[in-house]
Amino acid sequence: FKVSRVETKPIDGQKPGTSGLRKKVKVFIQPHYLHNFVQSTFNALTPEKVRGATLVVSGDGRYYSKDAIQIITKMSAANGVRRVWVGQNGLLSTPAVSAVIRERVGVDGSRASGAFILTASHNPGGPHEDFGIKYNMENGGPAPEGITDKIYENTKTIKEYFIAEDLPDVDISAEGVTSFAGPEGQFDVEVFDSASDYVKLMKSIFDFESIRKLISSPKFTFCYDALHGVAGAYAKRIFVEELGAQESSLLNCTPKEDFGGGHPDPNLTYAKELVARMGLGKSSSQGEPPEFGAAADGDADRNMILGKRFFVTPSDSVAIIAANAVESIPYFSAGLKGVARSMPTSAALDVVAKHLNLKFFEVPTGWKFFGNLMDAGLCSVCGEESFGTGSDHIREKDGIWAVLAWLSILAHKNKENLGGENLVSVEDIVRQHWTTYGRHYYTRYDYENVDAGAAKELMAYLVKLQSSLPEVNEIVKRTRSDVSKVVNADEFEYKDPVDGSISKHQGIRYLFEDGSRLVFRLSGTGSEGATIRLYIEQYEKDPSKTGRDSQDALAPLVEVALKLSKMQEFTGRTAPTVIT
Ligand code: VG1
Ligand code: CO
């Protein structure tokens, strides 16, 4: 093939967000749009991470992925990349990409040093919906801010990109290596099975035999909803083939380019079918719900865990996994190195860390901040309130890992009990946890697709309000006399303990005397308008008061939050789009 140099001009708005660049498909298919971003990424990396390197290119299979894979392959060839690895049909979940970078050895003994992941995660897909791209580094984790800032700077000055226009499209539907001769030597495209490396890794972490026993127990019933995302490709292999679950326990496990027209976000609003099956929500199905249910997002890094008629808040989930990991999961049998959560995630994990005397870290939203801690051996288990949970087995959050972690805990708690009367249920485990550690009532209100200007004004107003705590407390007292007082308010700023880098403006916090918290943030993953996220949390230590309905328990704080932020005044919204 030949290398063509194509002249181009900067295109506005190519700033990567919380997790890569996400835009409507119609934006991505504009001439040069994807090309500019990919070249800007190559130019942001040190030359040896490009020339002669091996890169993974794959994603959640959403609309435009197949075209994007061919374009990135041709640009890789032209930029001197030695090999491109592609999961069969272009499918690799985000956690599988991380695993592939860290674990996979190519047919010729090569190892990958980075990846382009093609996904907009939990955002809908299809010709009128979202596409996305992000770059992951040699450790398998998302590029740190230093790199994403550089990529963005490059997109603002780009003048040219390189592409092997005459390189034929590669058949990505069949496994195998295709080689091409270029001006600098050989270039290979290796297509490989999307699941095997990941399955192998999971088998090295968990005790599959004990999970198999749990799943085969007649009293245990199971249900997994991939929402037509890429998780389906892994669910079949792991839950059915390896662990013996019935095919009928899988819902929406065929990956589709448009996620079947749905919103592939595993929460109580969007995972409707699963929610009904589990006996939750208004339209709950007939018959006895399964003991355990879970769902994933489009790229399979998120998880929602449900018990029979019971929802596990993600902030509780990570705390419960941390509290039970050592005895239930072989990978952790030597102990946890430390735990971490994102700032808006509830403090349930903090309490476990204190009890177990573990190192603890609070980082900004987005998985990239956990990677440094893990690379430095400071953190084993971490999570976010946004249905993200994971560990240092890779450098991304991992939806199927979280399900296997829960199944391991259930298997462990029921070890002596599989023939007995009743199984220890998901709900039992969570209630027991609350009794031991207290409960963090938690909810998140999302105001999606709000006018971007209005959202900025609301945030600016809150920052300004913070400078006067008396004024804040005046509003609090006037709104609800039963809410405790605000003792501190700030904008969260993070100094990475490993590399010393500082991330500012990571959300506005109001901290109350009784440990309650209100957090306001603007989303960095949307593709249109702005999304305001409001996180509400209240700690209850008294075991006799941990069983309330969380929306009831939090109602006073919610009222205060809406009043403090003048939510309706700024946004015109009387209610959030999604409550989790
Ligand atoms: C959201 C979540 C955040 C998560 C990010 C990526 O970001 O709040 O916790 O890490 O999505 O998840 P934001 O900026 O919209 O609040 V995923 O599954 O898109 O990779
Ligand atoms: Co995701």
Image (cartoon, rainbow, N blue to C red):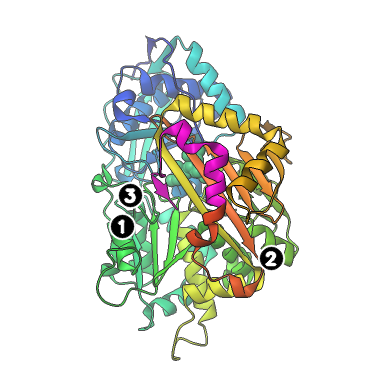
User: Which type of secondary structure does the marked residue at label 3 adopt?
Assistant: loop
The span from disc 2 to disc 1 (Cα, nearest Å) is 37 Å
Compare residues 173 and 529 and report the one nearer the observer: 529
Compare residues 278 and 546 and report the one nearer the observer: 546
Amino acid type of the residue that numbered disc 1 sits on in the rendered structure? Lys
Q: Which residues are magenta?
A: 557-580
- The residue under label 2 is 335
- Whether the residues at callouts 1 and 3 have beta carbons within 8 Å, the answer is no
Q: Residue at x 31, y 17 (%)?
A: 31
Residue 570 part of the magenta-drawn span: yes
Compare residues 52 and 429 and report the one nearer the observer: 429
Q: Alpha-carbon neighbours of circle 1 within 10 Å: few (<14), some, or many (≥20)?
A: some
- Residue 114 location (% of width, % of height): 51, 36
- Residue 496 location (% of width, % of height): 70, 38
User: Which type of secondary structure does the marked residue at label 2 adopt?
Assistant: loop
- Please tell me which of labels 2 and 1 falls first in the chain: 1
Q: Alpha-carbon neighbours of circle 2 within 10 Å: few (<14), some, or many (≥20)?
A: few
- The residue under label 1 is 272
Amino acid type of the residue that numbered disc 2 sits on in the rendered structure? Gly
- The residue under label 3 is 229
Using the image, determine if residue 326 lies above or below residue 503: below
Q: Is residue 108 shown left or right of residue 164?
A: right
The span from disc 1 to disc 3 (Cα, nearest Å) is 15 Å
Using the image, determine if residue 400 lies above or below residue 246: above
